[in-house]
């Protein structure tokens, strides 16, 4: 596979006003690796899914072009397939700080969470309590509510401040009791970008004797993740939000997975994590997952460090770059008459929710698309959150910058939103 050049740029190349000698993400160099960014279209819908670098597409193509069979040890083709799975588990382990033996793969986070909910709920009894959060994507609400209903367990809710978009420790502890079995909540909101203080909240959840199932889909693309430090018992992510192929993973401690008994075929291996994965995996997709993590590690530039260390370094660079984008976006939008930014979380990803007063959000999304700017529109499967925000069934506009976006992209969307608002 291609060896990537250093992505550490001269600071002036990224931020002309910043003359300090600090390391910055080489966004221009990064964009050269993404074939989909060759045209002039401005992709600001990264919260829905990112474009992929050339190396990820190549890894998928090379795997599909090579001799391949069902994973095994008898033939070279079988060993290649088996190695693709091991390499992908190791890669996700390096991405989020998990043991490879605790990495479970599936088609998407929604499907995986339904499966994990069915499995975990086997231990619930009438009178138990399950806690879900109104700020979450429906994929981390509906599975738990349905299984609680089947088990006769009570569902309790964590609310959020609709003005700021924040969740506090008090909001979480108010929902806990000595009967709480599991808390499902987000590590970052897919609508407001809110990043709760998960480490503190996890400590309170564990003190109540409950497990924490953390939806990390909207956090993993934007910041360094360590599942052990943050206290998640289960951490779910989607690789197509992090420059990878359409795939998902749930990670947990192997010892915790050993305690669970998922539904499976009699012929399925009983070992962890394989007992949680139904059927033959997509080996080519898993090769893309491994390449995705290798690409992220390459952004750090220093090949003498471990891949985990380079991933943490790279995600730190990404986080700093995206803070600049978020600040520029919010300041630009809030300066426009008749345009509202929803929420002002204390800590957040660059994901930003906005609306033009008195105007259907889809009209703005269409206006932007006609001018070569892609954003997301709707409720984003976070109906509890958008309902609490008073947005109605049409929702709002979500601008989702990611690492390959530039300040020019932000200026383009602010300018276009301003022109739209002035015409109303």
Image: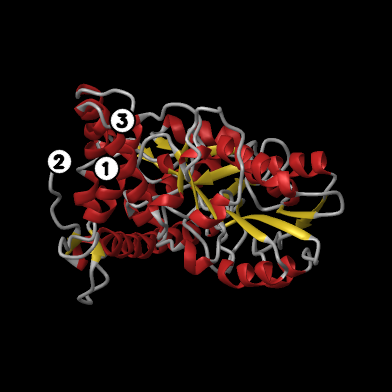
Question: For the residue carrying disc 1, how many other residues have a C-alpha within 10 Å: few (<14), some (14-19), or many (20+)?
Answer: many
Residue bearing mark 3 = 72
Secondary structure category for the residue under label 1: helix
Residue 100 horizontal side relative to residue 389, left or right: left
Q: Are marks 1 and 2 in contact (CB under 8 Å)?
A: yes
Q: Is residue 327 left or right of residue 353?
A: left
Alpha carbon of mark 2 to alpha carbon of mark 3: how far? 24 Å
Q: Residue at x 32, y 49 (%)?
A: 91
Q: Which residue is mark 1?
A: 291
Which is more foreground, mark 2 or mark 3?
Answer: 3
Total numbered circles: 3
Q: Earlier in the sequence, mark 2 or mark 3?
A: 2
Crowd tier of the residue under label 3, counting other residues whose Cα lies within 10 Å: few below 14, some 14–19, many 20 or above = some
| Relative side of 288 to 351, left or right | left
Out of 254 and 271, give the one closest to the viewer.
271
| Residue located 20% across and 22% down the image | 67
| 160, 141: nearer the viewer | 141
x%, y% of residue 192?
58, 54
Dot 2 alpha-carbon crowd within 10 angstroms: few under 14, some 14 to 19, many 20 or more: few
Q: CA distance from mark 1 to mark 2?
A: 9 Å
On the rendered image, what quadrant is the N terminus found in?
A: top left
- Residue 155 placement (x, y as % from top left): 80, 51
Residue tagged 2 = 1
């Amino acid at each position: 596979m291609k060896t990537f050049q250093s992505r550490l740029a001269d600071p002036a190349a990224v931020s002309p006003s910043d003359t300090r000698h600090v390391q910055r993400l080489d966004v221009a160099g990064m964009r050269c690796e993404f074939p989909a960014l060759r045209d002039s279209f401005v992709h600001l819908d990264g919260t829905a899914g990112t474009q992929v670098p050339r190396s990820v597409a190549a890894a998928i193509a090379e795997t599909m072009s090579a001799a391949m069979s069902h994973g095994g040890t008898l033939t070279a083709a079988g060993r290649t397939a088996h190695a693709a799975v091991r390499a992908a588990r190791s890669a996700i382990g390096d991405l989020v700080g998990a043991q490879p033996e605790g990495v479970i793969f599936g088609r998407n986070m929604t499907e995986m969470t339904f499966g994990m909910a069915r499995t975990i709920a086997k231990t619930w009894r009438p009178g138990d309590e399950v806690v879900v959060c109104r700020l979450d994507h429906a994929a981390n609400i509906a599975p738990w509510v349905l299984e609680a209903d089947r088990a006769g367990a009570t569902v309790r809710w964590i609310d959020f401040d609709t003005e700021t978009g924040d969740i506090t420790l008090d909001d979480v502890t108010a929902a806990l009791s000595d009967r709480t079995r599991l808390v499902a909540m987000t590590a970052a909101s897919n609508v407001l970008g809110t990043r709760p203080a998960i480490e503190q909240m996890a400590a309170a959840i564990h003190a109540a004797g409950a497990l924490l199932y953390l939806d990390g889909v909207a956090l993993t693309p934007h910041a360094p993740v360590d599942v052990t430090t943050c206290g998640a018992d289960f951490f779910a992510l989607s690789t197509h939000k992090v420059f990878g192929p359409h795939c998902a993973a749930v990670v947990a401690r192997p010892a915790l997975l050993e305690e669970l008994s998922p539904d499976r075929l009699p012929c399925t291996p009983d070992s962890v994590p394989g007992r949680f994965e139904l059927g033959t995996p997509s080996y080519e997709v898993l090769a893309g997952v491994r390449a995705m993590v290798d690409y992220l590690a390459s952004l750090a530039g220093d090949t003498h460090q471990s891949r985990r260390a380079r991933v943490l370094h790279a995600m730190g660079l990404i986080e700093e770059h995206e803070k600049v984008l978020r600040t520029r976006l919010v300041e630009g939008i809030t300066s426009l008459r008749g345009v509202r930014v929803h929420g002002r979380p204390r800590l957040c990803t660059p994901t930003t929710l906005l609306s033009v007063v008195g105007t259907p959000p889809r009209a703005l999304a269409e206006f932007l698309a006609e001018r070569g700017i892609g954003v997301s529109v709707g409720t984003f499967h976070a109906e509890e959150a958008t309902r609490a925000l008073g947005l109605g069934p049409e929702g709002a506009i979500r601008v989702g910058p990611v690492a390959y976006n530039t300040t020019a992209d932000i200026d383009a969307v602010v300018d276009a939103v301003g022109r739209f608002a002035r015409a109303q």
